[in-house]
Image (spheres, helix red, strand yellow):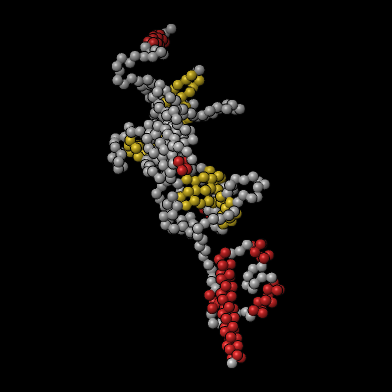
Amino acid sequence: MNKKLFKIAILLLFLGAATITNAQNWSLSGNNLNGVSTPKLGSTDNFDFKFYSNDQFRMNLTKTGWLGLNIDQPRGWMEVNYCPPPGISQTGSIVTLHKCNGNVTMATNFTPDFIGGAVTAIDTSLSGGGGEGSGGSAPFVIPINFATGNITNILSPLYGTESPMFWVRKQIPPGIWPGASGPDEFDTKFIVMPDGSCGINIAQPRAALDVRGSNAPNRPAAIFGSRALGTGYTDPVTGLYQYYTQQIHLVPVLKTNGYNRITQQGDQGLFFTDGKGASGANSQSALVIAPWAASGDSCVGGMRMDRNGNIEFRGDLRTTKVKVDANWWCDFVFAPDYKLRPLAEVESYINKNKHLPDMPSEVEVLENGIDVADMQALQQQKIEELTLYIIQLQKQMEAMKLELEDLKQ
């Protein structure tokens, strides 16, 4: 062995001994930090810190601080690679709330059906019984009209006595928002509470799903839809495969003519589209609001709005008032030049057609239905014509009475 190889061997021996000595100082059953204020576990050089179990790679904390679970080089601050073997069902990420050593308190009379708010009292007129209770401190009232927000201080409880199970938030400089106390101010983006309520842009969700949209007019707060087939294309810049969607969307704030010319300033809207029109607008789709009924049940009705806004309604309609816009009215009957049909002509028409002049026949009504505004105007026309006939008869009777008086003399 030459001198150079000998020196290398001695150096490796010293390094190995140092490694073994340092490893022996770390106990797998627990370690006493001896008052060390900033203990460290990991690397002190410019290399990744990788974790293994069963001699298999499991996790990598990169030198830049990015965490990869089951992926060696994460492409973000944290990336999880979930890849179950073929034919094997495996669960992905789980967040579980446990009652551990009494640290998490859950009321023993908590009712699972009450999801989406701290419950201390329920309106008995709607629940049909006495009030239910839980550990929450804020009353749950019907209708749901209590206030909410998205900026909170991490040191104060968000929701009764419970803390969030999952919280996505943005840290903001202290003192920007009124009522928030620094320095720990956070803008909530998504939150899941232990009772199952979820909030998007809301820190205290008031329901199983509570979504706060933008104040910007004509911007939806929620969109529910599926892919509109035949509309897909690849964006040449991002490479993202895009398509329009057949959807229903909710818009909290609308401008005049927003999404539809019937819209007025400040309205709220529910809109639908099949995504196959210009810019994803509706082409042929209709919106149906109806009970889910068996396919053979023809007695269950509902409402259907077609692509032009025409509504088909099947079932009884009960209301306190109906206002119908009319296209015409019948006061022309009282015009001096109106030609009132002689009663003999009316009688002849009835005998031949079995309905009044200007009115639809039974066959037409049963086949096409009736236009309420037109029918009301037609009926009013007949009432006004009847009034003219009565006036004519009254004049004839007065003339006959005068003739009788003359004959008596």
279 above or below 383? above
- Give how far across and how far down residue 190 sits, in percent: 42, 38
Residue plotted at (46% across, 29% down): 95
The quadrant where residue 130 appears: top left
Q: Nearer the viewer, residue 27 or 48?
A: 27
303 above or below 329? above
- Give how far across and how far down residue 194 sits, in percent: 44, 32
- Give how far across and how far down residue 159 sits, in percent: 38, 35
Residue plotted at (64% across, 73% down): 357
Which image quarter is the C terminus in?
bottom right
Judge left or right: residue 365 versus residue 376: right
The quadrant where residue 264 appears: bottom left
Which image quarter is the N terminus in?
top left
51 above or below 275? above
Question: Can residue 283 be seen at all in this image of the molecule?
Answer: no
The quadrant where residue 330 appears: bottom right
